[in-house]
Image (spheres, helix red, strand yellow):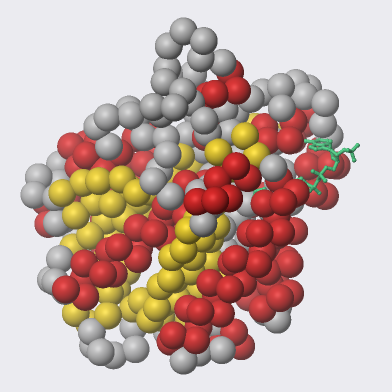
Amino acid sequence: MARSVILGTGSAAPGRVVTNLDLEARLDTSDEWITQRTGIRERRMVEDGGKWSDFMVPACRAALEMAAVAPEELDLIIAGTLTPDMFMPSGGCTLQALLGAKKATGFDVAAACSGFVYGLTIADRFLRADPGMKILVAGGEVISQRLDWEDRTTAVLFGDGGGAAVLTGGEDGERGILSSRIYSDGSLWDLLYLPGGGSQTPYGEGFAKKDNTIQMRGNELFKVAVKSMARACRDALEEAGCGAEDVDLVIPHQANLRIIQTLAGLMKVPMEKVYVNIHKYGNTSAGTIPLALDEAVREGRVQRGSLVLLPVFGGGLTWGAVLLRW
Ligand code: UT7
């Protein structure tokens, strides 16, 4: 059966490293609390004036280079992000212009942390209909500008960064995306949200800091996240006729090491088969999976024939999983 294949991956993050000790100095928190409760040791953040495309363009270029695909060959650019350079144009259009992807159509997927997995799923559907297409799927955020630096319950969790993958279709055989599942439950929106800037609370007079920063009910979100990702993994595996024991590497959304460990426990997958880089980047929202996938590929943890599972969850709520044979 013809499948959608990832030809190349790339990732990038801003150069400024912010450690837990740096956060201790500005918040009522500690390195010990952050490390024990989340697994995060440091994260990257843009400098003042830094923007999304500063690191997303290099991430996309690296993916194109690995794929040996020129920007002019791209037909479609799908960007999973809630923090593009501007509210309009979309991040997809910004990437199209900056990469020189002249014939590509660009758009964004608003699925918060699930943006990259949603993007892969959309790309897969396009490629099933038109296997000759070349598609760039990107995911990443500048989330540091959307944090309330007086709220220790969110400020310590996130970081900036992202990655990308170049896909095409039509390869016969085992290789490629075997199954992909995406889900939403909008009734759970208030577990994680960013209230301002939409039509309900437009920018302008009376716009409060709370409106421009991430609001979260972390404890409840933790439980929903684990259950929903486990369900999505089960569905994706079932659709492909695979079992959890067949998976060579799980590359999950990096929101909290304890969430990842609990998910692995539920799936009965040993942690040796789970890729973790949250200690270096924190939660980069739609950036976590493409960043981790690219690192895993470049480190040789993902090799030709590896069965790789990508589970995610995020604001919306949104969640899903992609299963692919590398
Ligand atoms: O991409 C999706 C984005 N979000 C998530 O995935 C978040 C999911 N949730 C989580 O990761 C966890 O719920 C958190 C890491 C956010 C919190 O961990 P927790 O183990 O659920 O802690 P908690 O909220 O139950 O808080 C425990 C204590 C509280 O103090 P008291 O009430 O026990 O005195 C908090 O006030 O820890 C306190 N606390 C902190 N202490 C030091 C909360 N944040 C901090 C902090 N430093 N940064």
In this rendering, does residue 99 appear at all?
Answer: no
**Residue 184 percent coordinates (x, y):** 48, 58
Does 64 sit left or right of 14 as displayed? Answer: left
Does 103 sit left or right of 109 as displayed? Answer: left
Quarter occupied by residue 244: bottom right
Front in this rendered view, residue 244 or 66: 244
Vertical arrangement, residue 132 with respect to residue 219, above or below: below
Which part of the image, by quadrant, shows the N terminus? bottom left
The residue lying at 53 percent from left, 33 percent from top is 194
Vertical arrangement, residue 206 with respect to residue 174, above or below: above
Vertical arrangement, residue 191 with respect to residue 26, above or below: below
The residue lying at 31 percent from left, 55 percent from top is 137
**Residue 17 percent coordinates (x, y):** 60, 34
The residue lying at 74 percent from left, 74 percent from top is 265
Q: Quarter of the picture for ligand 1? A: top right
Does 44 sit left or right of 130 as displayed? Answer: right
**Residue 46 percent coordinates (x, y):** 50, 28
The residue lying at 36 percent from left, 41 percent from top is 56
Quarter occupied by residue 176: bottom left
Which part of the image, by quadrant, shows the C terminus? bottom left
